[in-house]
Image (cartoon, rainbow, N blue to C red):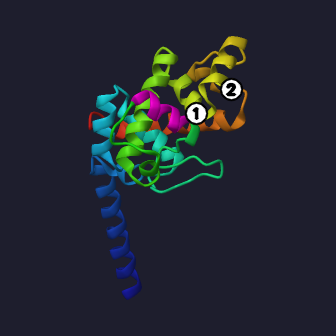
């Protein structure tokens, strides 16, 4: 008899958890959190970059963990390569951002990353998929792929991106971008 009561209690607890999970309007945000929302909101607005694109890139690059440095030397939340970061700092003339701050300060890294995404967006006429590919592989390579016709720059044709690493990167960023826009709607 005790065994049956325990089973009923466990079943009720399980059903209660499932009900809370599905009746809660924002339960998916538990699995797809966005950190540094204020910084993303501020810098995406300043540079007219989709905040969900910034969030998706951060998720794929570092999963929101600060202080990261890749084997290739990319730094910070958005994993900016040092040469790209130096060039962007010269071009953007951001008074509060320095190479030293980029690695450990989320706001500085997000600001320079947002500026760079804005720059890439201008270079690729707002083609989000090409911008994502250029963020990973570099704009020169993406321009060459488009010019040679090995990739047409569309989301539907991502499977034809010549580099496997970039192809996988673009697919992952688009996946998280779609998840974030569906889950969070108009949060930003």
The residue to which callout 2 is attached is 161
Vertical placement of residue 52 versus 118, above or below:
below
Horizontal side of residue 172 vs 106, given as left or right: right
Residue 95 image point, x, y percent: 33, 38
Q: Does the magenta stretch include residue 88?
A: yes
Residue 128 picture location, percent across and down: 49, 23
Report the front residue among 177 and 95. Answer: 95
Residue 1 visible in the shown view = no
Which residue is depicted at the point 59% across and 24% down? 139
| Residue drawn at 58 percent across, 33 percent down | 170
Secondary structure under the numbered disc 1 in the rendered image: helix
State the residue in front, 58 or 28. 58
Residue 74 visible here: yes
Q: Distance between the residues labelled 1 and 2?
A: 9 Å
The residue that mark 1 highlights is 170
Residues tagged 1 and 2 counted as in contact (Cβ below 8 A): yes
Which residue is found at the position 40% from the left and 34% from the top? Answer: 114
Can you tell which mark lies on residue 80?
none
First in sequence, mark 1 or 2: give its number: 2
Numbered range of the magenta stretch: 84-92
Judging depth in this view, the residue of 19 and 152 nearest the camera is: 152
On the image, the x and y values in percent for residue 143 come to 63, 18
Position of the C terminus by quadrant: top left
Secondary-structure class at tag 2: loop
């Amino acid at each position: 008899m005790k065994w049956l009561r325990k089973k009923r209690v466990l079943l009720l607890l399980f059903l209660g958890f499932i009900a809370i999970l599905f009746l809660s309007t924002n339960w998916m945000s538990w699995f797809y959190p966005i950190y540094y929302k204020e910084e993303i909101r501020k810098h995406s607005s300043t540079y007219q970059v989709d905040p969900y694109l910034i969030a998706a890139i951060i998720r794929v690059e570092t999963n929101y963990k600060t202080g990261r440095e890749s084997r290739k030397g990319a730094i910070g939340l958005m994993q900016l390569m040092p040469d790209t970061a130096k060039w962007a700092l010269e071009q953007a003339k951001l008074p509060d951002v320095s190479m030293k701050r980029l690695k450990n300060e989320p706001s500085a890294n997000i600001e320079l990353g947002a500026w760079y995404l804005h720059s890439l967006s201008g270079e690729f006429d707002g083609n989000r998929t090409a911008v994502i590919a250029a963020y990973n592989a570099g704009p020169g390579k993406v321009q060459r792929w488009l010019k040679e016709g090995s990739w047409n720059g569309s989301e539907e044709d991502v499977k034809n991106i010549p580099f496997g690493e970039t192809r996988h990167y673009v697919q992952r960023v688009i996946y998280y971008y779609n998840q974030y826009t569906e889950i969070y709607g108009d949060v930003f």
